[in-house]
Amino acid sequence: MVEAFILIQTEVGKADSVVREIASIDGVTSAEPVTGPYDAVVRARADDVDSLGKLVVARIQAANGITRTLTCPILKL
């Protein structure tokens, strides 16, 4: 199991709609709007790194209003 935080930048005024759309995607465990250089933080879970990549590229980045993402895998130390 691989988990990651995905930091998202959106078009101006789109953070709320992006968060609502992403929250319904299978594999997304939480999605919250935030302030600062990013507009939303998403926590996601997948079976492996390849599946996580597919989730981010094919599903999350496809949400209307996203301009950029940064995926931060969570380490199990």
Image (cartoon, rainbow, N blue to C red):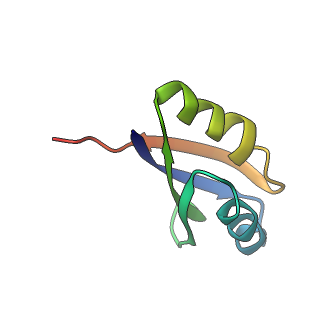
In the image, 53 versus 35, the foreground residue is: 53
Residue drawn at point x = 64 percent, y = 39 percent: 55
* Number of marks in the rendered image: 0
In the image, 52 versus 65, the foreground residue is: 52
Q: Residue furthest left?
A: 77
In the image, 35 versus 61, the foreground residue is: 61
Residue drawn at point x = 70 percent, y = 69 percent: 15
- Residue 13 vs 24, above or below: the answer is below
In the image, 21 versus 67, the foreground residue is: 21
- Residue 74 vs 24, above or below: the answer is above
Left or right: 5 in relation to 63:
left
Q: Quadrant of the N terminus?
A: top left
Residue drawn at point x = 64 percent, y = 31 percent: 54
- Residue 9 vs 57, above or below: the answer is below
Q: Quadrant of the C terminus?
A: top left
The image position of residue 72, as x and y in percent, is: 42, 42
Q: Which residue lies furthest to the right in this view?
A: 64
The image position of residue 58, as x and y in percent, is: 74, 36
- Residue 60 vs 16, above or below: the answer is above
